[in-house]
Amino acid sequence: MKILIVRVSSLGDVVHNMPMVADIRRHFPAAQIDWVVEEAYTSLVRLNPHVHNVIPIALRRWRKTLFSAATRAEIAAFRRQLQAERYDVVFDTQGLLKTSVVMRLARLADHGRRVGLGNATEGSGYEPLSRIFHDQSIAVGRRTHAVMRARLVAAGALGYQVEGEPDFALQAPQPARWPWMPETPYAVFFHGTARAAKQWPPAQWIRLGQDLAARGLPVLLPWGSTREQAAAQQLAEGIPGAVVLPALPLMQAVSLVQQARLVIGLDTGLTHIAAAYGKPTVELYCDSPRWKTEGNWSPHIVNLGDLGAPPAEEAVLSAALGLLD
């Protein structure tokens, strides 16, 4: 059986989609599973050994130069790669019009099916028009966790029950070490996020970092924009021994997470990668619903805060020290 997954973005959503791959493999060991994903995340999906072929798409980049000859040539090449196989099942677990169009472009084997989400979950960006491209729509509960949502769609289409904790199957990236990586154990603060309301106050990050530094655990501060870089430098000025990292490509950021002694982060993709690896992780929810994405599959993950209820500094420190112990 040949299966195609269309889940193109964002980083956290791609991570949360991975356990459906292990589920399919468990029930259909000989299945070939391919995945269409945004070009920025192809290296991450390749860390999953259950994925046979990763097909990059560049929707974010193409829409800026849609009518250029170079973009049209890239789209044509993508379409050829997408249609090189005939699939028995094509899944769109994102539920958007753009992803359902990609699903429709894929070629089906005889009696093949296109399967997608049958309804929105609470607060999702689901677009009901996407269902016109489905042969089968799988409905899920309104308050279904992001990981479980994809697992239920696959199970409903392929005729099995979802069982056990999610298996993200992420392998360690290679090479495992980078020049900026300390030789001693370290903590990582994922303090940056695009939306200001999701941020945690700098003063609390600093006091938390001071407590960890006093216990001999240096803090590394990654960033993803010039604004986040400036914020990291501000935190480093108040945290003894803290290091502001250089700009990291995705695989270096994954190595940073995969080898950390402790990760504390906001509701962002890299924090969710830490949870997927089962690293000791404290997830901070300041202005997003915790039930949607919390790491609920491991005792090494602590989820604090909720929509409109940022976590208290004392609770975060207590959780961090508990995980270290």
Image (spheres, helix red, strand yellow):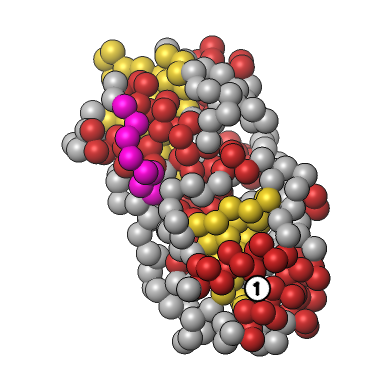
Magenta span covers which residues? 161-168
Which residue: 37% across, 28% down? 154
Which residue: 75% across, 75% down? 206
Which residue: 30% across, 46% down? 50
Q: Count residues near mark 1 (Cα–Cα under 10 Å), then give few for <14, some for 14-19, many for 20+.
A: many
Indicate the amino acid at tag 1: Leu
Name of the residue lying farthest toward the left? 30
Query: Is 162 one of the magenta-colored residues?
Result: yes
The secondary structure making up most of the magenta span is: loop
Q: Is residue 216 above or below residue 296?
A: below
Label 1: which residue? 221
Q: Judge by depth and name the residue closer to the eye, 132 or 236.
A: 236
Q: Quadrant of the N terminus?
A: top left
Q: Judge by depth and name the residue closer to the eye, 281 or 150.
A: 281
Q: Is residue 81 above or below residue 271?
A: above
Q: Is residue 25 left or right of residue 93?
A: left
Q: Judge by depth and name the residue closer to the eye, 7 or 183.
A: 183
